[in-house]
Image: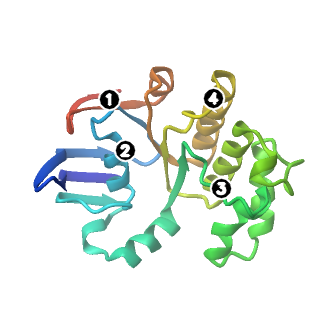
Amino acid sequence: MIRTENLGKRVSVGGGELEILKGITLEIKGGDSVAIVGASGSGKSTLLGLLAGLDESSAGRVWLDGEDLGALDEDGRALLRARKVGFVFQAFQLLPALTALENVMLPLELRGEHSAGEQARRFLARVGLEARLDHYPRQMSGGEQQRVAIARAFAARPAILFADEPTGNLDTHTGERIVDLLFELNREEGTTLVLVTHDTGLAARCSRQLTLEAGALVGDTA
C-alpha cells in the first residue's frame, strides 16, 4: 500500500540546510496498523506528510497504492489523496461554520457522491453522534469533535488513514474511546492505518512500530 526508497527531506535554515529525514526505506501492506514513534523532532510528522503526499521529498521516492507521488504534480497528488486517503489530526480540523453532518458530508460532496448525506449520517451514527447531526463544533466537546473528524475520515472509505497524534488534545478516558473507535473501524473497513504518536499504549496496539531517531529509521518491530 505504501513503499518508500531512500526517502529524505532537507529544509533551508539560516543560509544552510537542515536534514530532517534521511534514507528512509520501508513498505507498509494493505490493512496494516503502523505507529511511527520517536522523540520530539525526530521527523515523525514530516515522514507522515511525505507518505501522504502533503509535502514533497528532497530525495528518494514514495509510492502510494502503486502511484509514484514524485511523478504527480500538486493537482495529481490532491486527486490521489481525495480518492485514497483519510486524515485525522490532533487539532480536529473541523470547519466551524458547518454542522457535524455538513463537516462529514463536505469531502463526499467534493468527490461528487450522490449519497453524501446518507453516508455521513451512517458514520456519525457509528461513532455515537446520531443525536448531534445539527450541532456545530463549538457546541461539542473535544472528544465529540474528534469523533466527527473520524467519521469524516472513514465516510470517504479511504484505502489509507493517516492520523497525527489523534488523542493529543483529549483526556485519557476520551482518548481511549477514540483509539478503540479507530481500531474498530480499521478492522471493519480494512483500512490501512498509519499514525504518529507519543503514546506508548497506542503504539503497542498497532501491528507494527517504526522508530525514528534524528531523522533515521532505527527500529521496525511487529
Q: Are marks 4 and 1 in contact (CB under 8 Å)?
A: no
Residue of label 1: 38
On the image, the x and y values in percent for residue 68 come to 28, 67
- Amino acid beneath label 1: Gly
Q: Is residue 177 above or below residue 157?
A: above
Judged left or right of residue 87, residue 152 is: right
Quadrant of the image occupied by residue 147 = top right
In the rendered structure, find residue 94 and report the number of the disc placed on it. 3
Q: Which of the colour schemes (rainbow, by chain, secondary structure, one colour) is used?
A: rainbow
Q: Earlier in the sequence, mark 2 or mark 4?
A: 2
Q: Earlier in the sequence, mark 3 or mark 2?
A: 2
Tell me the distance, in whole angstroms, between the alpha carbons under discs 3 and 2: 20 Å
Residue of label 4: 175
- Amino acid beneath label 2: Ser
Tell me the distance, in whole angstroms, between the alpha carbons under discs 1 and 3: 28 Å
Q: Earlier in the sequence, mark 3 or mark 4?
A: 3
- Given residues 124 and 133, the one toward you in this image is 133
Residue in view at x 37 percent, y 44 percent? 45
Q: Residue furthest right?
A: 131
